[in-house]
Image (spheres, rainbow, N blue to C red):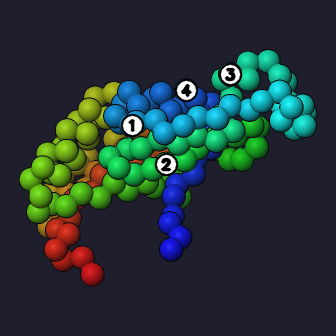
């Protein structure tokens, strides 16, 4: 069956992947740089090809996120899309992982849109905007009540 993955494009995916590794604790899957023949075919400079990313990926808490450079095309991130990390509020280890990650990320200087807090529906939620303008929702709900 098909799987749905986030695929993000950055001005500099290599730098972005390092940011997510440092701030979000991401592990890196791969990063493929553009080669000289590809750059020539696309009419791009062959300088600093080691810093380009034609395709890459990283993992945040077991969730794979793929990425590449924008190569001058595409729009920056907007508030129309949010990546949500959902935790089981009935699992003390998951709630601790949520609190730890949220604290680490917010201490890195991100913009807090909605502080992580208990919500009326019985879970927790907080939203931040990272240094690239990408919105992340940190969410915990009782997974035993999911359909």
Q: Tell me the CA gap for discs 2 and 3.
A: 21 Å
8 above or below 16?
below
Which tag, 4 or 3, sits closer to the chain's start?
Answer: 4
Residue carrying label 4: 15
Q: Which residue bears the numbered disc 1?
A: 26
Q: Residue at x 75, y 37 (%)?
A: 71
What secondary structure is marked by label 3? helix
Q: Visible in this render: residue 11?
A: no
What is the count of numbered marks?
4
Q: Residues within 10 Å of mark 1 (few under 14, many from 20)?
A: many
Q: Is residue 10 left or right of residue 118?
A: right
Mark 2 and mark 1 in contact? Answer it, CB < 8 Å: yes
Q: Position of residue 133 (x, y in %)?
A: 51, 41
**Mark 3 Cα within 10 Å, few/some/many (few <14, many 20+)?**
few
Q: Residue at x 57, y 51 (%)?
A: 7
**Marks 4 and 2, the one that precedes in the sequence:** 4
Query: Observer-nearest residue: 10 or 75?
Result: 10
Query: In the image, residue 134 lies at what x, y percent?
Result: 49, 45
Point out which mark residue 50 bears: 3
144 or 129: nearer the viewer:
144
Image quadrant containing the C terminus: bottom left
Q: CA distance from mark 4 to mark 2?
A: 15 Å
Residue 7 appears in the picture as rendered: yes
Seen from the viewer's position, the closer of residues 128 and 43 is 43
Crowd band around label 2 with a 10 angstrom C-alpha radius: few (<14), some (14–19), many (20+):
some
Circle 2 residue? 65
Give the CA distance from mark 4 to mark 3: 12 Å
């Amino acid at each position: 069956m098909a799987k749905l993955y986030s695929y993000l494009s950055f001005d500099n995916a290599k730098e972005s992947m390092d940011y997510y590794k440092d701030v979000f604790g991401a592990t890196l899957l791969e990063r493929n740089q553009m080669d000289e023949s590809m750059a020539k075919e696309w009419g791009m400079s062959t300088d600093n090809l080691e810093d380009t990313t034609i395709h890459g990926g990283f993992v945040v808490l077991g969730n794979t996120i793929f990425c590449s450079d924008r190569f001058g095309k595409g729009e920056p991130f907007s508030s129309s899309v949010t990546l949500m990390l959902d935790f089981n509020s009935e699992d003390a280890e998951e709630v601790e992982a949520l609190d730890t990650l949220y604290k680490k990320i917010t201490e890195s200087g991100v913009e807090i849109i909605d502080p992580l807090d208990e919500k009326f529906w019985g879970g927790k939620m907080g939203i931040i905007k990272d240094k690239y303008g990408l919105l992340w929702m940190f969410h915990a709900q009782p997974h035993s009540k999911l359909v």
